[in-house]
Image: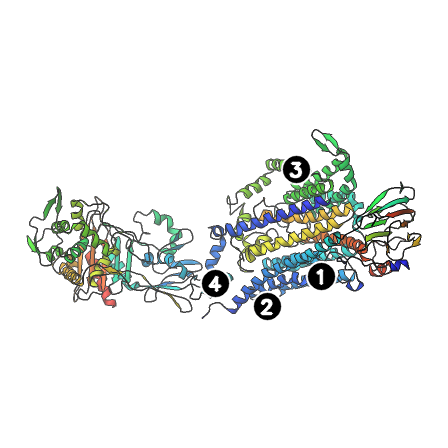
């Protein structure tokens, strides 16, 4: 003969479920977080070949030439202040182009700029792999790509 | 900036960890203290929601029950048996000893109780039935009148306590309100005189001495003894009879009936300390009797080894003896059970709301004190004491009552305490009684008549 | 030609780039998990109160969960790339808040829902609107001015609709809001803007003053002045919790901007000095400290709240006395000041710790948004807003647990309080906005899609599109 009713048991189960579900949610968020961190860490640990960009030409106000930029992480080129290489040249768009590691080489890609991004004089419409000696141009600014001897 | 943001993040993490620890401190570490604290309103709320079991007498009458979260007593006359239940002042007697059952924490089904505990829902307690008979209790109350003292009645066959009165008593339901008055009352109403009261037994103790002497064949019922002057001296200490026997020589049985201190003093010396101690121990004297309620340990003497004077005095019931009324009732009952010492108990059953019996009190024995032969002889002694001795006031028409008076020193300047132990019907005893009337004078004067009334009521109840 | 041939595979990463994956699946998966505890809680209450699940008092809870779904759908439709963990986390917290209000003061349920709805609308507008977070940088001084005006208004017109002893509200008895909640956002905007702007000056052109290197007073002064004024006003107004909060946020943002640890040390010393002065000057401060040190001094009178809070905590244990089964209402103002205690009493230490974990995760996520931002202003803004949430939580829970003196700040998203909900949803909106912006940038960096496809996929609102 039980003096514990079905309602009591249901209530007890629901109470336990409440706390359990809270923790299940916490754990799910933690897992999601981990995946995020893993992904960014993985991206960060991609083996890369370090490269350099040497400024060969620039609009007045963007000089002096000869300045070297080390290429070791994704680079955003443009006029907006949040770009890694922020230029003042009017012919450069806000987010003009970007350079990122493409698994086997550094790639440059135009981000829909008005005047286009040139690689060795040719307008780049898709992402282009960079090799040592390539010349890239955005507006009036020109760089030479230098890679270490393979 | 990155590093700083990360540092700040770690600092916040530490902060949250501290919060978690703080939470754990209050919720786990200090929980027992806080959950039961006097200021915590949840304690009262839990009381109101839970239904504590009732305490009933053997006929089913309610002695104590819960109303609106308060514990009320229908019958204050049983106050010392039920005990009080107060949040501020604690619990005593049955309320305490059987709290697990009354509060509902004890159940028959462990799974159920575990679920209940987790669910934290309101509990329904078990009803506890005592062996007391309310009618007898009330009769004892009437018999004692407005005197202070104690009355205890044992069922000889089982050892059940059928009546246990300690006067003055109080109303447990009004304990919180009356506490100051009660705790400062010099008559000490909160004290259970039956099991906790320690008194000099006076001549009632002669029953123990006589039983010890008979059982060890130091003396026989028919042995002639003489007490011509009603007094004697032992080691310079003068011992007198409270009343000179009618004859200078008589048999031992009459020495008992006429309560001769002189004869018993000499008998004590003959018995010797070692035998005295041994028999006292067999009856349960020297420690607290096993009992559900609070008991005080009785004692034969404080001194080891005993001097001759002390031994002699102890033998006739003075000395350093400290005995409780419950103990004397047990002694009396022993003679009704062929020398087997009963283990007294007062709780009969604890019954859960669904009817399951969770606890059952059972008769027990503390061992054998004397042979059946000795017990029979003692019964005849006690009958003689009532018929020819000082116990006449305990006699009942149509029933043979046996007993022994006792007059014990109380406080210098005040009347002695009046004692009586009784057994009836003496041939096949059903009830054993011990009565003490504080400051009542001679045993025969106050305690014996009370015993008569109580036995009368008991035997009428059947 | 060569361009096509030169195309390479891009790093896998977690670029949720493909057109077909524009929906916010992760968020959709987490939202039910976030809302379920809330529903189960309602079930417990329904069982304990013996009312049907469809009873009127549970409707605000369901409505709120519906609002969460609407938010998710809105964000997805507007192709928001914002972080997908923030909304579920806040949803879980606010859901517990709805549950808490329903349990403690059911008639206020619809009120809480109304403010939550308002807050969610604000959040969505901020998150998907055609503006950028860095726009706020331009309005830093406006922010500061608005803040001071608000405080001034409260000083003059302030009312005390709850009888708490301090006139901290504006409005009428029926509808009032607490300006200090908006003030905290304004303060962070100002500080983020100012510190981002003057950051280099503050770190580079240091002046030696004895053994310390201080930034030039001219630059430090407006900061200290702004902070000092708001602090003084708050203390004068008896809003001690807000004072502690503002002070903390100020220190944190200064530290992040300037990177010198000893600022924190000096700041803390100043804080304690200020605290001692206040203790000496104000009787109400003395009262709070006294009650904090010994809550048993007058458990029926002055220290009633904290004493009852401790009793409630002690009666909870590991699994609590059961939702609806305990007596949290013995703690006065449980739904506004002590929701943590109320939850801990009825659902136990296990639930309390889970709640703290949720806050910790929210703060962690907010700081990650800060870390992934490119612009200094964005970083400071995100870090500052997140710190507000973190500090507010720590101050109120710390006060509940007698770790620090009790103050009147609210537990974000869980306490009953319209202004608090509004302000905190606003904060969430800004964080979502910022994480959206950063994510768009990052996706662009990792995507390798042609520019044509990019134009299509970022949708109608292209705040980061190249200007022609």
Q: Give the residue pinned by disc 1.
A: C26
**Cα distance between the residues tagged 1 and 2:** 33 Å
Q: Give the residue pinned by disc 4.
A: B114
**Cα distance between the residues tagged 3 and 2:** 56 Å
**Cα distance between the residues tagged 4 and 1:** 40 Å
Q: Residue furthest bottom?
A: A1
Q: Position of residue A140 (x, y in %)?
A: 92, 47
Q: Picture quarter containing residue A32? A: bottom right
Q: Are marks 2 and 4 on the same chain?
A: no
Q: Nearer the viewer, mark 3 or mark 1?
A: 1
Q: Give the residue pinned by disc 2.
A: C52
Sooner in the amino-acid sequence: mark 3 or mark 1: 1
Position of residue B459 relative to residue B268, above or below, is: below
Q: Depth check: C408 or C163 in front?
A: C408
Q: Depth check: C345 or C121 in front?
A: C345
Question: How many numbered dots are placed on residues in this image?
Answer: 4
Q: Position of residue A38 (x, y in %)?
A: 71, 55
Callout 1–callout 2 Cβ contact below 8 Å: no
The crowding category of the residue bearing disc 4, from other C-alpha atoms within 10 Å (few below 14, some 14 to 19, many at least 20), is few
Secondary structure category for the residue under label 4: helix
Sooner in the amino-acid sequence: mark 3 or mark 2: 2
**Cα distance between the residues tagged 3 and 4:** 53 Å
Which label belongs to residue C265? 3
Q: Residue furthest front?
A: A150
Parent chain of label 1? C
Q: Nearer the viewer, mark 1 or mark 2?
A: 1
Q: Position of residue B70 (x, y in %)?
A: 42, 58
Callout 2–callout 4 Cβ contact below 8 Å: no
Q: Quadrant of the C terminus of chain B?
A: bottom left
């Amino acid at each position: 003969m039980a003096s514990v009713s079905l309602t009591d048991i249901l209530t007890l189960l629901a109470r336990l479920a409440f706390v359990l579900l809270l923790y299940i949610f916490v754990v799910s968020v933690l897992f999601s977080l981990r995946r995020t961190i893993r992904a960014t860490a993985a991206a960060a640990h991609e083996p890369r070949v370090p490269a350099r960009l040497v400024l060969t030409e620039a609009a007045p106000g963007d000089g002096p030439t000869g300045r070297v930029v080390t290429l070791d992480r994704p680079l955003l080129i443009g006029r907006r202040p949040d770009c890694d290489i922020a230029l003042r040249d009017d012919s450069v768009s806000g987010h003009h182009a970007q350079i990122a590691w493409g698994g086997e080489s550094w790639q440059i890609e135009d981000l829909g700029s008005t005047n286009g991004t040139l690689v060795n004089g040719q307008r780049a419409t898709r992402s282009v792999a960079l090799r040592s000696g390539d010349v890239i141009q955005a507006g009036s600014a020109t760089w030479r790509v230098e890679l270490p001897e393979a | 900036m990155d590093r700083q943001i990360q540092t700040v993040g770690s600092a916040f993490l530490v902060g949250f960890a501290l919060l978690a620890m703080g939470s754990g401190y209050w919720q786990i570490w200090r929980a027992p203290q806080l959950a039961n604290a006097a200021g915590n309103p949840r304690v009262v709320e839990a009381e109101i929601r839970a239904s504590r079991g009732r305490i009933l007498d053997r006929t089913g009458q309610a002695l104590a029950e819960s109303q609106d979260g308060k514990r009320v007593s229908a019958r204050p006359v049983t106050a010392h048996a039920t005990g009080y239940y107060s949040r501020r002042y604690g619990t005593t007697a049955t309320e305490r000893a059987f709290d697990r059952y009354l509060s509902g924490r004890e159940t028959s089904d462990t799974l159920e109780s575990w679920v209940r505990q987790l669910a934290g829902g309101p509990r329904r307690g078990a009803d506890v039935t005592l062996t007391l008979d309310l009618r007898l209790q009330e009769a004892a109350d009437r018999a004692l009148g407005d005197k202070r003292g104690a009355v205890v009645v044992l069922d000889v066959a089982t050892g059940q306590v059928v009546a246990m009165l300690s006067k003055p008593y109080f109303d447990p339901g009004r304990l919180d309100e009356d506490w100051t008055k009660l705790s400062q009352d010099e008559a000490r109403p909160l004290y259970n005189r039956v099991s906790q009261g320690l008194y000099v037994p006076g001549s009632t103790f002669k029953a123990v001495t006589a039983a010890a002497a008979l059982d060890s064949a130091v003396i026989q019922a028919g042995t002639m003894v003489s007490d011509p002057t009603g007094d004697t001296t032992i080691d310079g200490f003068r011992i007198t009879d409270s009343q000179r026997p009618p004859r200078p020589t008589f048999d031992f049985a009459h020495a008992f009936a006429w309560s001769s201190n002189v004869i018993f003093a000499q008998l004590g010396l003959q018995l010797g300390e070692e035998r005295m101690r041994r028999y006292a121990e067999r009856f349960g004297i020297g420690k607290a009797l096993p009992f559900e309620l609070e008991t005080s340990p009785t004692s034969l003497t404080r001194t080891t080894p005993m001097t001759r004077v002390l031994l002699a005095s102890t033998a006739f019931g003075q000395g350093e003896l400290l005995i409780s009324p419950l103990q004397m009732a047990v002694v009396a009952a022993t003679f009704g059970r062929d020398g087997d010492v009963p283990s007294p108990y007062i709780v009969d059953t604890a019954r859960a709301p669904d009817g399951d019996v969770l606890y059952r009190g059972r008769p027990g024995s503390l061992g054998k004190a004397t042979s059946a032969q000795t017990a029979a002889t003692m019964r005849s002694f006690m009958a003689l004491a009532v018929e020819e001795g000082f116990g006449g006031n305990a006699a009942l028409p149509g029933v043979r009552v046996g007993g022994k008076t006792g007059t014990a020193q109380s406080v210098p300047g005040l009347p002695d305490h009046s004692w009586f132990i009784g057994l009836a019907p003496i041939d096949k005893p059903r009830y054993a009684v011990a009565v003490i009337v504080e400051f009542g004078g001679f045993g025969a004067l106050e305690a014996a008549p009370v015993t008569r009334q109580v036995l009368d009521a008991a035997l009428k109840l059947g | 030609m060569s361009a096509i041939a030169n195309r390479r595979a891009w790093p896998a990463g977690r670029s949720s780039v493909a057109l077909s994956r524009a929906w916010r699946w992760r968020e959709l998966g987490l939202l039910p998990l976030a809302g379920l505890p809330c529903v189960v809680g309602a079930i417990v209450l329904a069982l304990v109160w013996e009312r049907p699940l469809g009873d009127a008092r549970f409707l605000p809870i369901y409505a709120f969960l519906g609002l969460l779904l609407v938010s998710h759908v809105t964000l997805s439709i507007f192709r928001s790339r914002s972080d997908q963990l923030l909304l579920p986390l806040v949803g879980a917290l606010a859901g517990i808040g709805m549950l808490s209000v329903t349990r403690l003061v059911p008639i206020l349920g619809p009120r809480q829902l109304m403010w939550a709805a308002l807050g969610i609308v604000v959040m969505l507008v901020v998150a998907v609107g055609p503006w950028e977070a860095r726009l706020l940088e331009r309005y830093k001084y406006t922010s500061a001015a608005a803040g001071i005006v608000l405080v001034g208004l409260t000083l003059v017109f302030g009312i005390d609709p709850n009888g708490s002893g301090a006139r901290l509200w504006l409005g009428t008895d029926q509808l009032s809001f607490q300006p200090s909640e908006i003030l905290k956002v304004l303060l962070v905007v100002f500080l983020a803007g100012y510190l981002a702007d003057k950051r280099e000056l503050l770190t580079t052109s240091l002046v030696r003053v004895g053994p310390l290197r201080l930034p030039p007073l001219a630059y430090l002064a407006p900061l200290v002045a702004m902070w000092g004024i708001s602090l003084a006003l708050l203390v004068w107004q008896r809003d001690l919790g807000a004072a502690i909060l503002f002070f903390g946020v100020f220190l944190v943002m200064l530290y992040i901007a300037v990177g010198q640890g000893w600022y924190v040390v000096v700041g803390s010393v100043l804080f304690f000095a200020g605290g001692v002065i206040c203790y000496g000057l104000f009787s109400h401060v003395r009262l709070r400290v006294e009650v904090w040190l010994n809550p048993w001094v007058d458990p029926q009178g002055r220290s009633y709240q904290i004493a009852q809070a401790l009793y409630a905590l002690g009666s909870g244990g590991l699994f609590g006395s059961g939702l609806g089964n305990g007596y949290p209402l013995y703690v006065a103002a449980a739904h506004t000041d002590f929701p943590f205690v109320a939850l801990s009493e009825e659902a136990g230490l296990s639930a309390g710790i889970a709640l703290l974990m949720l806050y910790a995760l929210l703060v962690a996520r907010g700081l990650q948004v800060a870390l992934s931002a490119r612009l200094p202003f964005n970083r400071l803004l995100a870090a500052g807003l997140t710190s507000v949430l973190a500090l507010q939580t720590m101050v109120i829970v710390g006060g509940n647990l007698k770790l620090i003196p009790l103050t009147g700040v609210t537990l974000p998203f869980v306490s009953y309080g319209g202004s608090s909900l509004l302000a905190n949803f606003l904060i969430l909106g800004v964080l979502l906005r910022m994480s959206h912006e950063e994510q768009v940038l990052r996706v662009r960096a990792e995507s390798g899609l042609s520019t044509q496809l990019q134009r299509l996929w970022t949708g109608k609102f292209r705040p980061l599109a190249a200007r022609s």
